[in-house]
Image (cartoon, coloured by chain):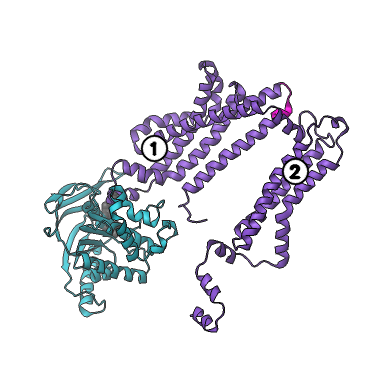
Amino acid sequence: MNTEERNKEGILVEDAKSAKKLTRDMLAELEQKEKSPARRALDFFISVCPMLAAALAAAEYIYVPNFERFVSSNVNPERYLIFLAVPAAIYLFFWLHALVRYRMGQKKYYWNAVHKAPLYSVLFLALSALDLLTLKSGKLLYPFIPWVNDIINAAIGDWPNLLKSCYYSLELLFKGYFIGVAAGLLTGIACGYSERVNYWINPIVKVLGPIPTATWMPLIMIIVPNLHAGALFIISLGTWFAVTLASRTGIQNVDRSLFDAARILGAKGHQLVFRVAIPSAMPNILQGMTQGMSSACISLMVAEMMGVEAGLGWYMTWAKSWALYNRMFAALVVLVVIFNAVTNALNAVKKHALRWQNGVK
Amino acid sequence: MAEALVLKIDGVSKSFARVETNDITNALENINLELHQGEFISLVGTSGCGKSTMLRLIAGLITPTYGQLTVNGKKIEGPSPDRGMVFQQPTLFPWQTVEQNLSFSFRMRNNYGENKDKVERILKVIGLENFRRDYPAQLSGGMAQRVALARTLICSPEILLLDEPLGALDAFTRMNMQDEILSMWRENRQLVVMVTHDVDEAIYMGTKVVVMDAHPGRVKAEIPIELDYPRNRSSSQFVEYRNQILDMLDYGAKE
Ligand SMILES: Nc1ncnc2c1ncn2[C@@H]1O[C@H](COP(=O)(O)OP(=O)(O)OP(=O)(O)O)[C@@H](O)[C@H]1O
Ligand SMILES: [Mg+2]
């Protein structure tokens, strides 16, 4: 009725039409509080902050004089600037993209930038603070805590070894993880289904469960001649345990009426397992896989630091034993990046697989 | 044309073992019924008198302790899409969209390809075309129940078993759904067996009301409803039927 009236007057026809086709963006915006001009200006300023912070960090690095002892030891000083410039440029690119999209009416990119901007700004400022405490003043003890450019130099100087270590670590991690997940799914689902399987698996899970799998490392080092295989076993064991437990719970708690419904609709035998039980237990299974991953990461580090002579954990202990602390830090940074990437990837998978749980976010 | 379908329930008893004590529950005792294609049976009775058990037996989800159930002389062994059942709760598969839920049965039997148009048609019938990509968590109770009903109907079952399918709905949606189910039944003339707690609903919809008695579950009476559709809930005959059935249920409670 409203629309018709507006039609007669010949105004707001466009509006009424587009109001009918609400998009998700418009919905989010409508449900948001009205923003004052001051608030909008502040939001814009916030969105620019990361670039300002990066510039500030660069200026600080260039204009504050180095600590006297380090004057000649900061080689390749431009590398740190590139290190600052790359993320700043990436942010700039997304910021421009967000502005263009904003003009086109898709505002979520911009709001996302505003949301993330303070965090990125603080990160740049933190880098600057670290630079002030190390290279510029020598307040933090060198060589135990090197400055950032020193770490960058170490990483670039020894990149073939770092890369090789990354490769070894990731290979070991994923091999162990996938063996563990596969075995865990098998036993977990079997346990959930069959009392008899559960009878035999449950005691193992109960007795070994509370013990961190890394505990077995020294024992494995003695009895298994091939340390790589031993580490693989330890990593798989921890993952297996987490996945078994979670998927067993998941299968045991599947709503019985779903099986009835599926059988009525003609599902039989393995279809009940693969099309009903497993999808229904998916939240638990993915939970177990996340836990398994964190356990696998711990085991990996313990294994590499205790005996396996490859990988980032080994690289770190090796660098430490030669007092190459900048390399140790370089490896640490790489580790942080890798573990975060793996966790984020897993979370993305989880979010996609479980999008049915609460509908659209 | 195929012969008219007959469902025979022959001296069927069903007992359940209890978990805590050593006794058994006699959910149903010596049930004898003969139901024919085109009938709409309303099953009423006090809570716990074995109505759901009866439907589950017909569906083939459970087997009888004594006696047997046959369809056209063939013993019922295990569930089949020919005997569709709609549960009190929608029991949709939460990880599947509306469309996927509707096509579940075809996908289980690997004949989705030939039946894609059926899914389209039924989406239209239940008025949820715009919700085909939504997950059950995003549907209202009434919408979910309509999908559950459609998911069963899409297999064109010869026997349709409804276990209080409208129990969770508000009065208005409920009356709408009653008419929807009735018009669908009058078009297809399957055998429908519907459990309900609502005596009015039983009389409004059924060609026959089967009244059950509890402890142990027995058939107390079979009351054919001789009224034309659509029925008038306030006509005098309707009220008479209602009083008759309510009396029986009351008597059962006092016993
Ligand atoms: N799987 C089971 N195990 C043990 N006892 C059961 C089981 N299913 C049903 N019963 C028992 O059988 C009897 C009948 O149950 P049923 O679910 O058929 O009742 P109902 O008539 O559908 O009741 P309501 O109207 O409340 O749904 C009850 O006493 C119940 O305790
Ligand atoms: Mg019941």
How many C-alpha atoms fall within 10 Å of the one at disc 1: few (<14), some, or many (≥20)?
many
- Picture coordinates of residue B144, whole percent (x, y): 38, 60
- Picture coordinates of residue A58, whole percent (x, y): 79, 44
At mark 2, the secondary structure is helix
Q: Amino acid at mark 2?
A: Ala
Is residue B48 in view from this perspective? no
- Picture coordinates of residue A41, whole percent (x, y): 73, 63
At mark 1, the secondary structure is helix
- Picture coordinates of residue B34, whole percent (x, y): 13, 59
> How far apart are the alpha carbons under marks 1 and 2?
47 Å
Going by the image, does A87 lie left or right of B33? right
Q: Is mark 1 within 8 Å of ligand 1?
A: no
Going by the image, does B228 lie left or right of A95? left
Could you say which chain is coloured purple in the image? A
In front here: A180 or B174?
A180
Going by the image, does B57 lie left or right of A288? left
Could you say which chain is coloured cyan in the image? B
Image height check: is A93 above or below A203? below
Judging by the rendered image, the residue that carries numbered circle 2 is: A126
Image height check: is A68 above or below B78? above
The residue drawn where x is 60% and y is 28% is A301
Q: Where is the C terminus of chain B found, in terms of image quarters?
A: bottom left
Give the label on residue A189, or none: 1
Q: Is residue A245 magenta?
A: no
Q: Where is the N terminus of chain B found, in terms of image quarters?
A: bottom left
Stretch in magenta: A322-328
